[in-house]
Image: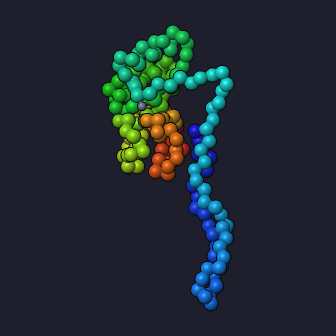
């Protein structure tokens, strides 16, 4: 998902009748615009396997064993506090050829989280991934399905973070 265009304000001009102190005409010179989100990655006949909320000491090793046996790669969107508790699993995910993604640090509903706290959630997990693997990630999945659609400006900080994050 990419931001193709960011919101921009509209503009209009007015024509006034000074003698009567009234507005007699209005013209929009630019219409306001909202976010334009572009989705991509369509690959007919292929699927992307993704795993959220780990790493989990019981399930993640089992999933990794199966993926290795089948020669399949996936993407693991980790919760930072789980990564902190299971650092070797984070390293194993990457060592076995999978991708890592950021799924916040404590799995809050970002739609109900102040932007400053959301920034901490994202940055803490990003730094954890970097510290444990020596690599960064541009992949981010917000917790809870309701955050999948960026309909509210309130939620736009996640996009800005993704757009501006360094690799
Ligand atoms: Zn989740």
Quadrant of residue 10 within the rendered picture: bottom right
Residue plotted at (67% across, 67% down)? 29
Task: Look at the picture and state if 1 lies above or below 42.
Answer: below
Left or right: residue 62 versus residue 167 is: left
Q: Residue at x 64, y 85 (%)?
A: 17
Of residues 118 and 112, the one nearer the viewer is 112
Left/right placement of residue 84 relative to residue 37 reads: left
Farthest residue to the bottom: give it. 19
The residue lying furthest to the left in this view is: 85
Q: Is residue 100 above or below residue 158?
A: above
Residue 15 quadrant: bottom right
Q: Would residue 132 be seen by someone viewing this image from the given angle?
A: no
Q: Position of residue 2 (x, y in %)?
A: 59, 42
Q: Position of residue 157 (x, y in %)?
A: 47, 48
User: Relative to the observer, which residue lies in front, 132 or 141?
Assistant: 141
Which quarter of the frame holds ligand 1?
top left
| Image quadrant in which the N terminus is located | top right
Residue 117 at x, y percent in the picture: 36, 46
Q: Position of residue 27 (x, y in %)?
A: 67, 70
* Way the structure is coloured: rainbow
Q: Quadrant of residue 144?
A: top left
């Amino acid at each position: 998902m990419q931001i193709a265009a960011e919101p921009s304000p509209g503009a209009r001009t007015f024509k006034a009748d000074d003698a009567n102190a009234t507005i007699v005409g209005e013209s929009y010179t630019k219409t306001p615009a909202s976010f334009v989100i572009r989705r991509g990655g369509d690959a007919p006949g292929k699927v992307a396997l993704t795993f959220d909320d780990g790493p989990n000491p019981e399930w993640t090793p089992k999933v990794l064993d199966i993926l290795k046996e089948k020669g399949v790669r996936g993407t693991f969107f980790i919760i930072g506090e789980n990564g902190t508790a299971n650092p070797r699993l984070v390293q194993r995910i990457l060592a076995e050829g999978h991708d890592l993604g950021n799924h916040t640090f404590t799995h809050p509903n970002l739609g109900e989280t102040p932007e400053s706290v959301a920034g901490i959630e994202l940055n803490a997990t990003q730094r954890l991934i970097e510290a444990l693997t020596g690599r960064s990630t541009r992949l981010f999945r917000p917790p809870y399905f309701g955050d999948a659609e960026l309909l509210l400006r309130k939620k736009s900080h996640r996009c800005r973070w993704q757009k501006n994050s360094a690799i």
